[in-house]
Image (cartoon, rainbow, N blue to C red):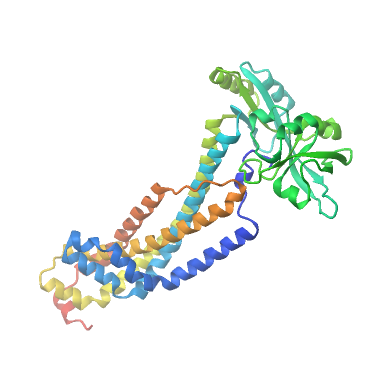
Amino acid sequence: GAALAGGAAAGATGSGGSLLGLGVLVTLIGAILLGPMLAGVVIRVLGAWLPVVFGSLGTMAQRNALRNPRRTGATAAALMIGLSLVSGMAVVGSSLVTSATSEMDKTVGADYILTSGGGLRITPEALAKARATPGLEHVTENRFLDAAVSGAAGAAGGKMPFSASSPTMVQDFNARTTSGSLSDVFTKGGIALPEAEAKSRHLTVGSVTTVDFHGGSGPVQLPVLAIMRDDTVFNHGDGYVSLDTLSRTVPADKLPAVDLVFAKAAKGKQDQAYQALKDSMAPFPQITVKSQTDYKKLIHDQVGGVLNMVYGLLALAIVVAILGVVNTLALSVVERTREIGLTRAIGMSRRKTRRMIRLESVVIALFGATLGVGLGLAWGVAAQKVLSGIGISTLAIPVNTIVAVFIGAAVVGLLAALAPAFRASRMNVLRAIAADG
């Protein structure tokens, strides 16, 4: 929790994550095994438009896709696996971005956020420059460290992360509580604990506990003045303490460096203060100044970057799926050599033959996409429910991505059918009729 968005990076852990992983495995195996049974029903539904649009040609394509359900199910399985992962990750990513931006609107009251990169910290000189920036109402420094917090009688203690901040923290960050008040932490010299940490130690508001801050001169007795909600994206799992309280127990040369700074503009001076703050931080290239809008875009770009890497890896699975469809169609064309020859003999043109094979391929690809998207949506919804405990509370379905998946599946079907369709249309009619089978 050393960074504002630390909680957003937390994964599904504990029993919820284990059950989710088991559920993904079981449903995937089930879909693969039930694929041949589902093929008959799903392809009839997906291919219902073919006879309407393409007449008898569409009917033949639909029936050809249904001839061997076992083969069709196996062919669609590779495509299904790849697209289910794409869809599931897209749902999780969209839910994460939507929840994080919504949480920022609810909890972050500061106009600007200053962070440092490359493992560096915000230096005292940079902090002084920020405080002297014209147009700012106040600046809130945040330091992060670990501390050992003891439990009540019979309860285990242990280390946990803390955020130590200026009193203006309560104006810049609305950290929600289940009991007590966070403002008391900055006026009465106590601590706030996350709900899970407080429960594990059997501590409530009013309890006095022993706290040993990292780098401190020794354990101190501090009252618990607030219990924080656990379902938060930002600073998830962090306790809170004021810088004044921390400085009384940790020597100045042992205080943790400033990791994060909030800044609030004076009323009506947001634009001027933003530019002035950027100019003030220009001598410190390790420091980035972002408005709330900038920070939301950063979250979106970071999640998008991870998803793009996943999509790139899954593109390999799609290539394998294309080869599977090509192989199935090629085998189907060989098995139907005489049939194709007869249809050519009674008047089907080469163009229509190619179209029939392409339509058959598109239906198979859409079948794989339907199963994949269905599984992916189920996995994404389940993952969002598991992650709701750390603030991913909003379920967002990326409709554009889902539509793109189906369009992409149709394109995959068309590409996979190129070679088999060309071969079928170029058959010698007399030899095809004379072929066995």
> Residue 328, how many percent across, how many down?
33, 71
- Residue at figure coordinates x 69%, y 25% from the top left: 126
> Residue 179, how many percent across, how many down?
70, 41
Q: Quadrant of the C terminus?
A: bottom left
Task: Tell me if residue 336 comes above or below residue 28 in the rendering.
Answer: below
Outermost residue, right side: 218
Residue 286 shows in the view:
no
Task: Tell me if residue 404 comes above or below residue 205 in the rendering.
Answer: below
Foreground of the two, 286 or 59: 59
- Residue at figure coordinates x 62%, y 43% from the top left: 232
> Residue 353, how many percent across, how many down?
19, 66
- Is 111 displayed left or right of 396 in the figure? right
- Residue at figure coordinates x 64%, y 56% from the top left: 13
Foreground of the two, 143 or 241: 241
> Residue 393, how many percent across, how many down?
55, 47
Residue 427 shows in the view:
yes
Outermost residue, top side: 134
The quarter of the picture where residue 147 lies is top right
* Total marks in image: 0
- Is 278 displayed left or right of 420 in the figure? right
The quarter of the picture where residue 434 lies is bottom left
- Residue at figure coordinates x 44%, y 68% from the top left: 31
Outermost residue, left side: 346
- Is 233 displayed left or right of 31 in the figure? right
Q: Quadrant of the N terminus?
A: top right
